[in-house]
Image: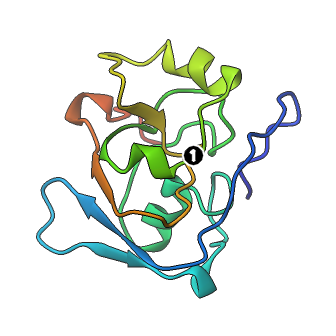
Amino acid sequence: MSGKNPFIKPPKTKLPTKGYSIFLEGMDAPIRVEPGELPYNEPGLPGSLLSTLLAKGIEIDHACGGVCACSTCHILVKKGLDSTNEANDDEEDMLDEAPALTPMSRLACQCVPDGTSDIHLKIPEWNRNMVKEGH
């Protein structure tokens, strides 16, 4: 599944040309991202933080499947925000639904780093989707 929503114009993104690291608050070791591995076949835009985190084994909620139709993948980009694509109006509209919005808030499904700097992230505890499907 890709992070494409047929009802919105996709944001302009640029995949990285050099490797970078994702430092996730609460994890001891950084997650290394190499351009040759991208894009992963995961939900979200190609090269998005959602796609990358899922491919690296980090669970993050994404109730809409990574198509910018909810705010469950709300993250805080504490450092490196300037190396990501700009949030478009559709992402901003979805972020308005997220609790505790900050200037560092992004949707992981829409946030694509260009690799020019490392990224420092926090996945807010209050952003966990408490509804889980099961058998």
Q: Nearer the viewer, residue 67 or 15?
A: 15
Image quarter for residue 22?
A: bottom left
User: As rendered, which of 86 and 7 lies closer to the eye?
Assistant: 86
Circle count: 1
Residue sitting at 36 percent across and 23 percent down? 103
Horizontally, is 9 left or right of 17 in the view?
A: right
Drawn side of residue 53 relative to residue 85, left or right: left
Amino acid, disc 1? Cys
Measured along the vertical axis of the image, is residue 19 above or below residue 1?
A: below
- Would you identify the image quadrant in which residue 57 lies? bottom left
Q: Is residue 104 left or right of residue 70?
A: left
Considering only vertical position in the picture, is 65 above or below 38?
above
The one nearer the camera, 107 or 61, is: 107
Q: Which residue is mark 1?
A: 109
Q: Label 1 crowding class (10 Å Cα cut-off): few <14, some 14-19, many 20+? A: many
Residue 119: in sight, yes or no? yes
Residue 134 in sight in this render: no
Where the N terminus falls, by quadrant?
bottom right
Which residue is found at the position 50% from the left and 82% from the top?
A: 34
Helix, strand or loop at label 1? It is loop
The residue at the far bottom in this view is: 36
